[in-house]
Image (cartoon, rainbow, N blue to C red):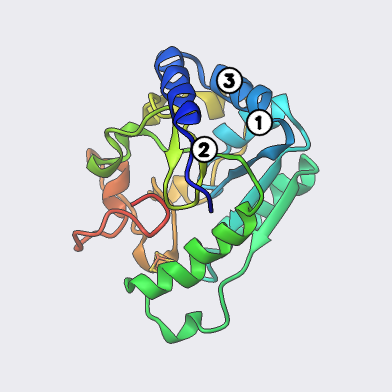
């Protein structure tokens, strides 16, 4: 992994400033125009808003699904259903061989199920798209729209950074996209099964993740 040049960092800062108030589709368009085929996106298949927006511009975009081995079966089925319908260029990662030795909540579990598989999947790429939003929680409140990702050594684009949860829901409904089957059962933010709980009325979406723990992130964005 090589360090970014000052010129690139300046370019990213300028783009970030210029795109701060832009629609997600404009951010995606910038990434595709700037990095061409060297862009991939990671999708947790919690909802289909960003993946739909991105595939509308580049139907051949590589979509990376981190199968941690701990997802709800509903998430796996949802991801496969959508991918078949839209003929998605899908890469599904799998956990490292020692993952079962490390229980959920340990750093090594994240490393083997998410971080290392994603690093391998992003190898050779110049930029990736994520569905992070500032409203997801304090650890994401300051994320840029465009920035440099130290951990993975490439440009990180967060087209939904300024969106709210309502914006996502509105987009999903407005565009007739399938909703994650667990939404109707009270799950709002959906990740690995051991750390995902339904959310009570009036609670924030992310409160169902890592409830009872001070952990907010699992490896990728922390
Ligand atoms: S949420 Fe739990 S099971 Fe999933 S990768 Fe993180 S530590 Fe492992």
Which residue is at 55% across, 29% downward? 172
Task: From this view, report whether residue 16 is shown above or below residue 49.
Answer: above
Q: Which x, y percent locates residue 49?
A: 56, 32
Which residue is at 44% across, 13% downward? 18
Q: Is residue 135 visible?
A: yes
Q: Which x, y percent locates residue 184?
A: 46, 45
Q: Which x, y percent locates residue 117?
A: 57, 64
> Do tag 2 and tag 1 residues touch (Cβ < 8 Å)?
yes
Precedes in sequence: disc 3 or disc 1: 3
Q: Which mark is residue 155?
A: 2
In the drawing, does residue 185 fall left or right of residue 74? left
Q: Which mark is residue 25?
A: 3
Category of crowding for the residue at label 3, using alpha-carbon neighbours closer than 10 angstroms: few (below 14), some (14–19), many (at least 20): some
The secondary structure type at the circle numbered 3 is: helix
Category of crowding for the residue at label 1, using alpha-carbon neighbours closer than 10 angstroms: few (below 14), some (14–19), many (at least 20): some
In the drawing, does residue 157 fall left or right of residue 110? right
The secondary structure type at the circle numbered 2 is: strand
Q: Which x, y percent locates residue 156?
A: 49, 38
Which residue is at 34% across, 54% downward? 198
Q: Which mark is residue 35?
A: 1
**Number of marks present in the image shown:** 3
Which quadrant of the render holds ligand 1? bottom left
Q: Is mark 3 within 8 Å of ligand 1?
A: no
State which quadrant residue 55 falls in: top right
Which residue is at 42% across, 47% downward? 150
Mark 2–mark 1 distance (CA, rounded to whole Å): 10 Å
Precedes in sequence: disc 2 or disc 3: 3
């Amino acid at each position: 992994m090589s360090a970014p040049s000052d010129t690139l960092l300046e370019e990213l800062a300028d783009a970030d400033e210029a795109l701060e108030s832009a629609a997600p589709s404009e951010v995606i368009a910038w990434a595709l125009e700037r990095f061409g085929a060297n862009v991939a996106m990671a999708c947790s298949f919690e909802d289909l808003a960003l993946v739909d927006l991105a595939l509308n511009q580049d139907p051949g975009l590589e979509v990376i699904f981190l199968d941690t081995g701990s997802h709800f079966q509903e998430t796996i089925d949802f991801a496969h259903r959508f991918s078949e319908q839209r003929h998605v260029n899908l890469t599904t990662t799998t956990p490292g061989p020692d993952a079962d030795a490390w229980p959920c909540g340990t750093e090594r579990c994240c490393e083997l199920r998410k971080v290392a598989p994603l690093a391998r999947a992003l190898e050779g790429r110049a930029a990736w798209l994520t569905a992070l939003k500032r409203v997801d929680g304090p650890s994401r409140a300051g994320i840029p729209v465009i920035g440099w990702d130290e951990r993975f050594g490439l440009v990180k684009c967060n087209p939904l950074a300024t969106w709210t949860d309502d914006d996502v829901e509105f987009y999903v409904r407005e565009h007739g996209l399938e909703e994650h089957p667990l939404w109707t059962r009270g799950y709002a933010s959906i990740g690995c099964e051991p750390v995902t709980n339904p959310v009570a009325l009036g609670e924030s979406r992310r409160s169902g993740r890592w409830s009872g723990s001070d952990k907010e992130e699992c490896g990728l964005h922390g």
